[in-house]
Amino acid sequence: MLRRELLGAGVAAGAASLLTAKDSFAQARVEQAARGMPSPKIKDISVIECAPQGVRLTVVKVTTDQAGLYGYGCATYTQRADLVRPAVERYLKPLLVGRPADRIEDTWQLVFNSSYWRNAADLNNAMSGVDQALWDIKGRQAGLPVYQLLGGKAREAVDLYGHADGADIAQVIERSKQYMAQGFRHVRSQVGVPGMAGYGAPQGANQRIPSLHDAPVFEREGYIRRAFSLFEAARKDLGEEIELLHDVHERITPTQALRFVKDVEKYRLFFLEDPVSPEDLEWFRLIRPQSSTPLAMGELFNNPNEWTPLIRERLIDYMRMHLSQMGGLTPARKVAAMGELLNVRTAWHGPGDVSPIGHMAMVHLDLTITNFGIQEYTPFNAATQEIFKGCPEMKGGYLYANERPGWGIEVDEAAAAKAPFRRDQLLNGGWGEIRLPDGQIIKQ
Ligand code: MG
């Protein structure tokens, strides 16, 4: 008998004694290994689109040539949702069908280089769909949750912040108390600004501020005054125990941002997010030395050249990248490891327009790293949970993974088909404009 066959027989006999009949898939893997079976090959790549309660979610399904072995990855890009499907079906599928399904790093590098021009938002999301699906497959192959493949738990569950927003300050305080009653220790505080289009909170029914146009209007100093009124009230009503976060959403000038981070120190924010836009990253070198307010940045990043200098020079405290936007779990875990060496922590972007697969990928990564900071939380509504079976579970302000193999989520494709994309909406999901009172357009 050949040495390999002898070894294979030994593996099969030893491992079989450890397995129970209920784990037939794992048993089949052991038998395949013993027979020297080839690794699974990618047989098909398909796109599942759905819009539970109007939110467009895109998921990629990678199917292998081994019966019952497949995986899901998040490729959600709501603002240009129609571009992701052709990127997957016309470019990634022809490139990848027939290739091994168990070479994740190799596949990522292959896809990354295949467009020659790299780091485009739609292509990164398509790539993430495949990448996360291959991690799901790897977990299902091993019979383990993905977090085990990443080294196992470094924490029991993932600490969250909830969105406490309101048209007026009293509503924000009330919403914060609701989160605190559920066990949350962190809330993002955003309040509407009378008469203008604020970010992250309803505007309310105020008469709009004077302007020279009819588009949504925003005035920078009015927003800043309103935000500080909110912080004052929140600390007074909610006390010091709750952690407060705030998102500027890149809407003020860099010099206003500098003043903001200095003046807000006394309210001891957990972090201040996006004080400047990705086009103004150099300003962090001026802002950072002048304040102890923790800074968070990164949800719009597509390119390693955006996040690398900020982390390397410790110009931010929290990296906020959007996992599908940066190309999947594979790049995210590398950047997290870089951040660990420099004590820059994670706060992955977790809005409602990330599929539960994408949220679960963040949870699995969060569970395994020691520079975890916080995770943005968006509840999964009933319509979403009907399609995605096995969503992460929230208890006491923490999010939990389940113990099923891979991501632990099954997608009900029939239910997804009953909630199709709507394409009759204004701008087909794209964003419109925000303008200063004089009509100048500003960042969203
Ligand atoms: Mg944000």
Image (cartoon, grey):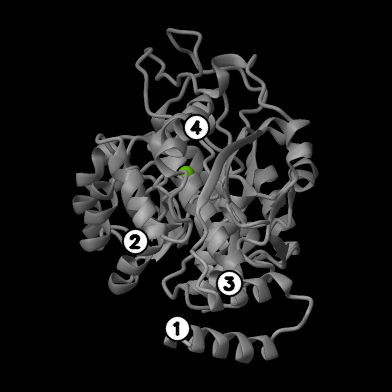
Reading the image, the residue beneath label 1 is 4
| Callout 3 secondary element | helix
Label 4 environment density (alpha carbons within 10 Å; few <14, some 14–19, many ≥20) = some
Q: Of the residues shown, which amino acid type is indicated by label 1?
A: Arg
Label 2 environment density (alpha carbons within 10 Å; few <14, some 14–19, many ≥20) = some
Q: Of the residues shown, which amino acid type is indicated by label 4?
A: Glu
Reading the image, the residue beneath label 4 is 89
In the rendered view, does 222 fall on the left or right side of 350? left
How far apart, in angstroms, are the residues tagged by discs 2 and 3? 35 Å
- Does mark 3 have its CB less than 8 Å from ligand 1? no
**Residue 103 circle label:** none
Q: Residue at x 37, y 19 (%)?
A: 441
Viewport quadrant of the C terminus: top left
In the rendered view, does 61 fall on the left or right side of 274? right
Q: Position of residue 343 (x, y in %)?
A: 33, 71
Q: Position of residue 91 (x, y in %)?
A: 41, 33
Q: Of the residues shown, which amino acid type is indicated by label 3?
A: Gln
